[in-house]
């Protein structure tokens, strides 16, 4: 699976992240970023999507749990260095979702 987007939230190079995270989870994270984009910039010809890192992390953790990828919790925590959500909640488009 190839991600056409590059996010500043990933501390590791995206190619490395791709090998670590299941493609179904990566795809869901990509879709989350696209529907919750705050800004788009370009760096070295690559599209860089900016979204709320804390909400993305909360969504990634919730999605991993729903997919029974519980072992990914620590990995996501390492890749996205931020608190998950905001006081127990995160936003996905217009929806306020409880973590
Ligand atoms: Zn947020």
Image (spheres, helix red, strand yellow):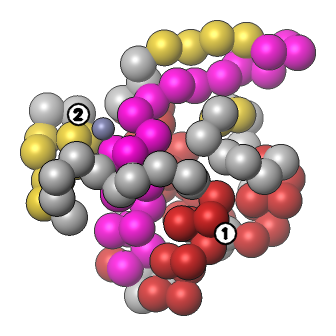
Q: Is residue 9 above or below residue 66?
A: above
The quarter holding residue 37 reads top left
Is residue 56 in sight in this rendering?
A: no
Q: In front: 42, or 74?
A: 74
- Residue at point 34% right, 45% down? 55
Q: In front: 67, or 10?
A: 10
Q: In front: 6, or 24?
A: 6
* Residue 35, horizontal then vertical, whole percent: 37, 31
Q: Report the side of 61 relative to 78 (left or right).
A: left
Between discs 1 and 2, the one toward the N terminus = 1
Q: In which quarter of the image is the C terminus?
A: bottom left
* Residue 30, horizontal then vertical, whole percent: 54, 44
* 10 Å crowding of disc 1: few (<14), some (14-19), many (20+): some
Q: What stretch is highlighted in magenta?
A: 43-65
The residue tagged 2 is: 93
- Residue at point 56% right, 14% down? 40
Callout 2: helix, strand or loop? loop
- Tag 1–tag 2 contact (CB < 8 Å): no
Q: In which quarter of the image is ligand 1?
A: top left
- Residue at point 56% right, 66% down? 76
* Residue 88, horizontal then vertical, whole percent: 16, 59
Q: Is residue 94 magenta?
A: no
Q: Does the magenta stretch include residue 54?
A: yes
The quarter holding residue 77 reads bottom right
* 10 Å crowding of disc 2: few (<14), some (14-19), many (20+): few
Q: In this view, does 31 lie above or below 23?
A: above
Residue 21 bears which disc, if any? 1
Q: Report the side of 88 relative to 72 (left or right).
A: left
Q: In which quarter of the image is the N terminus?
A: bottom right
Is residue 76 in sight in this rendering?
A: yes
Q: Distance between the residues labelled 1 and 2?
A: 24 Å
Residue 85 bears which disc, if any? none
């Amino acid at each position: 699976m190839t991600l056409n987007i590059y996010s500043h939230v990933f501390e590791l190079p995206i190619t490395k992240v791709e090998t670590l995270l299941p493609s179904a989870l990566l795809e869901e994270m990509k879709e989350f970023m696209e529907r919750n984009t705050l800004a788009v910039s370009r760096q070295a010809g690559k599209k860089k999507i900016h979204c709320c890192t804390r909400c993305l992390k909360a969504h990634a953790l919730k999605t991993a749990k729903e997919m029974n990828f519980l072992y990914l919790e620590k990995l996501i925590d390492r890749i996205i260095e931020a608190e998950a959500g905001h006081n127990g909640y995160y936003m996905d488009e217009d929806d306020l979702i409880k973590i």
